[in-house]
Amino acid sequence: MRIGANQRVKRTIERKACGLALALLVALPLVALPGTSALAQRANEPPVPKPIDPFMPGVVIDYREHMRAFVQSISTFAKSINPKFVIIAKDGLALVGKPDPEDDTKIFPANAYMRSIDGVMETGLLNQIITTPQGKADPQLEAQVKRKNEDLAMAHTAGLTVFGLEYATEPSAVDATYAALAKKGLIPFVAEAPQLASLPKHPATAFSANPLPITSTKEARNFLYVANAQTFGTSADFGQALRTTNHDIVIVDVFHNRKPLTRDDIYFMKYKNLGSPRLVLAQLDIAHATPFQYYWQPGWGPGSPPFLFSPVREDPDSLHTIYWDAGWQAIISGNANSYLYGIVDLGFDGVVLKGVDAWRFYEAGGDTE
């Protein structure tokens, strides 16, 4: 199997494996999220997990199950503080089913994982292309589409809210995409670009806007996702821009121009232009670390601390994390110094977990191709 990781990081992981197998306990000084009062400072048909880890021969690691367990622990912690706190797993649809260890053609519901979340968010649920560029049927693509539709049906049966995120700019294409997403029973948002850095120009108001108050994901008809708000000026300007919209759910980053939003900022966003309340969720990356985050320490880099792995190819400033490592998980959740605790303390109604599909990177041997 081809290994795409550099040798330095590979040696770090091998040292880490000795006598520990699945995770390290890392003594890590944490820096509190600023601005929070309570803080101290399958691709669509992936292969079945291999029994032997590609980085550490002889060590058994089920990357998918580790991600499910991580998401479940995040949910348990958040809901212990706020039982109504919403957990959405972005790119988490492929984890709703588990293949039978004896027969990978049989898929069973991952019930513990699905019970721990309120919904999943996916891009590409409208992609039903099953032909090659030459116009011939492609059995592999057909199998991918079939599996994705099976996962979607499993999620709906379990009562999960499924958010469909797509991209389009032409008004006619935007309207058609919204209609297609809604027809599949999805909560839709059609953004102009994957950067999610602007309010859409069309439609003028939210798709299927309604004046009713929103207290859960099951009541929502639409959502708005703005991952990068740098172009909106101050946090007050950003909040005012969102206040002019009528979306039932708004998803934003905790930080605005590298400064955390305040409780007042978030409270202001919780009302539609129509006047009724809605949900405001924070995005939280649980599988990648970046130097501009509040938790980053001087001297950090690949292999130091051990849960930092290799740079992300498309964004070298970010690093893949060994997300099943206890030290990394403690930064994200589980204690009063964690990122998630800060999000709850700020008054967000829930989180959208990014990086839930990070298991694909490790199953591919550290290669994003």
Image (cartoon, rainbow, N blue to C red):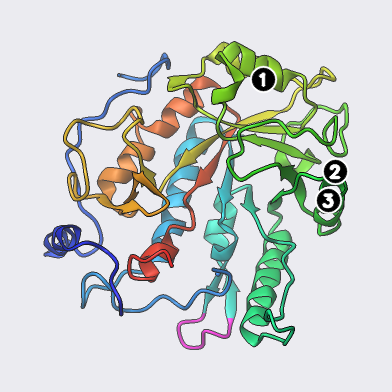
Across and down, in percent, residue 237 comes to 63, 13
265 or 140: nearer the viewer = 140
- The amino acid on which the numbered mark 3 sits, given as a three-letter code, is Ala
Question: Which element is circle 3 on?
Answer: helix
Locate the C terminus by quadrant. Answer: bottom left
In the rendered structure, find residue 173 and report the number of the disc placed on it: 3
Badge 1 density bin: few <14, some 14–19, many ≥20, Cα 10 Å: many
Residue underneath mark 2: 171
Residue underneath mark 1: 269
286 or 213: nearer the viewer = 286
- Whether pointer 3 and pointer 2 mark residues with C-beta atoms closer than 8 Å, the reply is yes
Magenta stretch: dominant secondary structure = loop
Residue at x-position 41% and y-position 64% = 368
Q: Is residue 267 visible?
A: no
Q: Marks 2 and 1, Cα distance to the nearest angstrom?
A: 26 Å
212 sits to left or right of 290: right
Q: Marks 3 and 1, Cα distance to the nearest angstrom?
A: 28 Å
Q: In the rendered image of this protein, does residue 66 appear above or below residue 245?
A: below
Magenta highlight on residue 166: no
Across and down, in percent, residue 297 comes to 22, 31
Residue at x-position 42% and y-position 45% = 286
Q: Which residues are magenta?
A: 100-106
270 sits to left or right of 281: right
Precedes in sequence: disc 3 or disc 1: 3
